[in-house]
Amino acid sequence: MEKLNINKGRLGLSLRVPILFIALGCLMFTNLFFTGDRWKKIVFGAILILYGLFRIYKARKKIRNMT
């Protein structure tokens, strides 16, 4: 039986979760799910996208240090 490696699971999540942040940020630009003040949606969506890009950068940096 193969031993479960928790680091691989954490690494997988660290690559998938930022994509969800970016997708949610893009959804903020539409009127599909969120209603309200237009400028607040744009600012909050941009912050979510930038945070998602930052998390992807950190995950890639961690992957490079592991090898």
Image: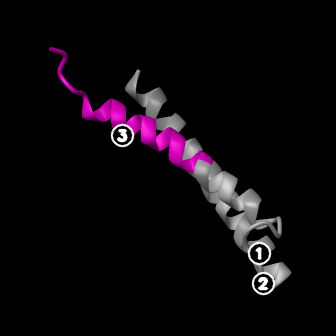
Q: Amino acid at mark 2?
A: Gly
- For residue 13, side relative to residue 35 (left or right): left
**Residues in magenta?**
1-19
Q: What secondary structure is found at the residue carrying circle 2?
A: loop
Whether the magenta-drawn stretch holds residue 45 is answered as: no
Q: Position of residue 22 (x, y in %)?
A: 67, 53
Tell me the residue that label 3 is attached to.
10
| Magenta segment main secondary structure | helix
Q: Amino acid at mark 3?
A: Arg
**Image point 70% across, 72% down: which residue?**
44
- For residue 1, side relative to residue 48 (left or right): left
Numbered badge on residue 36: 2
- Sequence order check, earlier mark of 2 and 1: 2
Tell me the residue that label 1 is attached to.
41
Which corner quadrant holds the N terminus? Answer: top left
Q: Position of residue 56 (x, y in %)?
A: 58, 43
Q: Are marks 2 and 1 in contact (CB under 8 Å)?
A: yes
Q: Position of residue 45 (x, y in %)?
A: 73, 66
Q: Quadrant of residue 12?
A: top left
**Image point 59% across, 51% down: which residue?**
20
Query: Whole-Å distance between the Cαs marked 3 and 2?
Result: 35 Å
User: Is 46 above or below relative to 53?
Assistant: below
